[in-house]
Image (cartoon, helix red, strand yellow):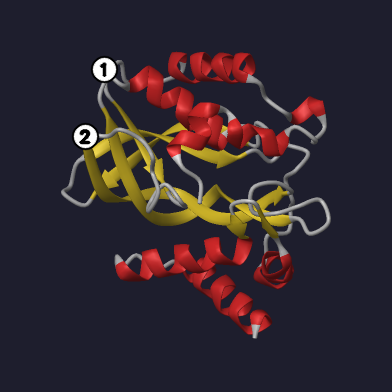
Amino acid sequence: MLTRKLIESGAYLDHFRGLDPAICWDDERQARSIAETMAAAPARDADIWVFGYGSLIWNPMLCFDERHWATLPGWRRSFSLGMVAGRGSPEHPGRMLGVQPGGSLRGVALRVSGTHVQDELRLLWRREMPTGAYLPTWEKAVLDDGRQVTSLVFAANANHPMHAQDSSVATVAPLVAMASGPYGSNAEYVLRLDDELAAAKAADAYVHALASAVKTLLR
């Protein structure tokens, strides 16, 4: 299981060392991305909100002051990013989760206080951006208590070399069923996500269909 200690120590990044150097982001490149993202933030509050739609739901590893289920309009989940490390391998590549324009989805919004922002962003970028496969963007999320907050969202980068146009269940399910790596199997991730969403009454039809297809293949 991925832990905060593994990310802080840099051990997590060791699994990406064998990839094409052109897509491996070191700390300096990640720091530039953080600076660019913060410069583009529409709100100037010291605190920030981070929207989690995948493992940030059950394993955030961030120091946060508030956590709320929320809705992110205009976006949908998509297993559209190739994965050859973590929960995949070059021999059996899996698929990472991202979000793409269209629809609406449910997830969690985490408020990180200003005193922790810089440290937590460094951790978050190490976790999410070892290959720069996402485009960090600022979007409006609606918390279940009615508040609207501008939150940081890691959207799939359609121009990234690891991005796949076809994220259909029929294409993705066989890849997920076969893929595994040092942090577990790709199937475990999909099934855990489906369970977490169902438990929160936030079911995602695409995720549920994929989980069902993967279960069938694993049998």
* Residue 155 in picture, x, y percent from top left: 55, 40
Left or right, 78 with reference to 162: left
Q: Would you identify the image quadrant in which residue 79 lies?
A: bottom right
The type of residue carrying mark 1 is Thr
Let me know if residue 42 appears in the view: no
Q: Is residue 68 left or right of residue 80?
A: left
Q: CA distance from mark 2 to mark 1?
A: 11 Å
Quadrant where the C terminus is found in the figure: bottom right
Name the residue rendered at 32%, 20% in the picture.
43
Label 2 sits on what residue type? Asp
Mark 1 or mark 2, which is nearer the start of the sequence? 2
Question: Measured along the vertical axis of the image, is residue 102 above or below residue 21?
Answer: below
Depth check: give the residue in front, 202 or 59: 59
Q: Which mark is residue 65?
A: 2
User: Which SS class for mark 2?
Assistant: loop
**Residue 94 sits above or below residue 61 on the image:** below
Residue drawn at x 36%, y 34% is: 151
Q: Position of residue 31 (x, y in %)?
A: 55, 15
- Nearest the viewer among 125 and 41 is 125
> Relative to residue 74, is residue 143 drawn left or right?
left
Q: Residue at x 25, y 39 (%)?
A: 148
> What secondary structure is marked by label 1?
loop
List x then y, in percent, for residue 68: 24, 48
Q: Please tell me in which quadrant of the rendered image residue 20 appears.
A: top right
Residue 184 is left or right of residue 68, and the answer is right
Q: Quadrant of residue 166?
A: bottom right
Q: Could you say where residue 132 lies in the image, as x and y percent from the top left?
A: 65, 31
